[in-house]
Image (cartoon, coloured by chain):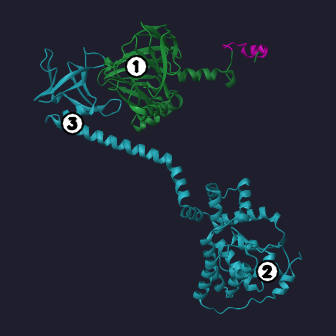
Amino acid sequence: MASFSALCFGPGLQPHGEKIPVRIGEEGLCLWPAEPREQIIPYQDIQVSAGGFDHEQMILAWSKDAQAWSLTLTDKHTRDILLAHAPPALAPQLVQWCKKIHGAKKRMRAGWLALVLFLLAPFLLLAVLLWNPDPVIGWAVNRISIENEQKLGDLIFEQTRPSLKLVTQGEAQRVIAEIGQKLAAGSPYTFKWHVADDPAINAFAIPGGHVVVFSGLIKAADTPEEVAGVLAHETEHVLQRHTLKAMVHNLGWRAVIAMVTGDWTGSLLGEFATQMGILKYGRDKESEADLKGLQLLKQAQIDPNGMERFFDKLSKQGGVQIALLSTHPASKERMEALGAAIKEAGTWRSQPLPYDWGRVKASLPVQ
Amino acid sequence: MAQMHEIDYQIFGSEMQYVEIELDPQEAAVAEAGGMMYMEDGIALETVFGDGSQQKSGFLGALMGAGKRLLTGESLFMTIFMNQGSGKKKVAFAAPYPGKIIPLHLADMGGQIICQKDSFLCAAKGVSVGIAFQKKLGVGLFGGEGFIMQKLEGDGYAFVHAGGTLMERTLAPGELIRVDTGCLVALQPSVSYDIEYVGKVKSALFGGEGLFFATLRGPGKVWLQSLPLSRLANRIYAAMPATGGSREEGSVLGGLGNILGGDR
């Protein structure tokens, strides 16, 4: 018969327990076998439970003469001996003990895992954001309502306005707004078109529908169709929320939270405004704006070749010195893709824009 | 058993105690850095990384030991006091705050004792000072001081410090007591340690006893302290003039005295 030693607590023993030999007998556990104080504990009297500091120890408890006794099996080796030679009378309780220990272990592990995940969640999110930001940013940006976006756009425009010499009257402003309205017809945004007196050949879009065209660009263009191409491109930056996404990318989650809740604090707005000047969207966003912009031109029945011609002309003229090209690099691939898309879209019945471009240019302030 | 150093000791004082350990030649004691009170000539002091119980386990073993010690909030190093002279020499370690020093002969206790972190004072060399994690999440989160405890393993003497008055209690099998989580100093590993919610919102909010009790279920011995340092520290902090406490003992003239005192 198998035997083991275990810590025994009971009346008359050391208060901190005594290590005693135990034999697994036929009828019961035999304590101190072959010693004068040998005694046999019948199996039906024994209660098996789990306990101890680590909650994994096996405690066999019984009472004798109304006094509590117990055996504590502290280490796994001892428990394995008892489990391997489990007497039938004790077997159901031992099986119960095993189940309880396993269940408790599982629960503990699951609990700790949940806690660790909970504590690490911000870091995991951050890691995902750094690793592959576009889907996350896209998701976050899609939560932002158009009203909030337009409110933000208005605020940013107000911040940027002092640094722009806006041309609020005259032929140029009216024509640009008319072409723009034609392009943006049917969009959920309320677009506002501005002309700024600035010799740089440039144009930019603010989230929510403010598009600013510099007078330098109008002067550099030969036909209204060329400007319409640029406007279609900028309109798509707004419609595809490129500006918003790029800002979120650069400014992080603070921006998303502010945008979703619509709560603007001054410093953040200032940062948005400074961002405006240096935003770059990346090649794929530019191509997207080109191709979707082409669709806008088609809808508005405007000749698409003006768009291609204008970029082509600019890149031949001045290279990188032209501001529009520094933020919208006219790479060879981009031009080719645009050309191919124009070919693919086929020709449509275009109506020439009914403006006298010379007069429009003349209406601009003289530098 | 051979690597344990058998040391003789004597405890002096009643409320602010220190323990004096007598070392035979080549015997040594380990202590938390900073606990030493005095030592006689001939005792050499060495600082080791980790707990000094496994000198030969290599660098990684020492690193593990030290890492665990960092978790319990102890310093990374322990100090070994070795008698390198001839004849018996003494070294003494003092308790850091009012209370009692408990001598624990680990061999008598089944070789293992779990005690609250910070309560370990010193031990014969060879006693390993490890950490005992509470695996139960509830205990871990709400057990207060009981989450990470120290595990003293070996056959020799270890000295543990308890604040205030010490209570040593033997729990019969199945016997249960509830204690404030801070008042537990040490327990045998055979004692089940769990956390129990106070149960009533009213007593939780206004009882001032904290939201959770530790429940200790026998069999085994437990040691409780009447005055956890944190309680004492709370009272002292509340009484400090810098935090709005009064410097005077509750006199009616206290406020006036403060004005006249002028010795801020």
In the shown orientation, is residue A37 left or right of residue B153? left
Q: Please, which chain is the residue tagged with disc 1 on?
A: B
Give the foreground label among 2 and 3: 2
Please name whichever residue, B71 or A89, is drawn nearer the observer in this view of the structure. Answer: B71
In the image, residue A303 above or below residue B244: below
In the image, residue A120 above or below residue A350: above
Give the foreground label among 3 and 1: 1
The cyan-coloured chain is labelled A
Please name whichever residue, B231 or A253, is drawn nearer the observer in this view of the structure. Answer: A253
Q: Residue under circle 2?
A: A220
Whether residue B251 appears in magenta in the rendering, the answer is yes
In the shown orientation, is residue A263 left or right of residue B111? right
Read off the magenta span.
Answer: B248-262
Residue B125 tag number: 1
In the shown orientation, is residue A286 left or right of residue A214? left
Residue A211 showing in the rendered view: no
Residue B125, position as x, y percentages in the image:
40, 19
The quarter holding residue A143 reads bottom right
Whether residue B5 appears in magenta in the rendering, the answer is no
Residue A93 tag number: 3
Label 2 neighbourhood size at 10 Å, few (<14), some (14-19), many (20+)?
A: some
Colour chain B is painted in? green
In the picture, the quarter occupied by the C terminus of chain A is bottom right
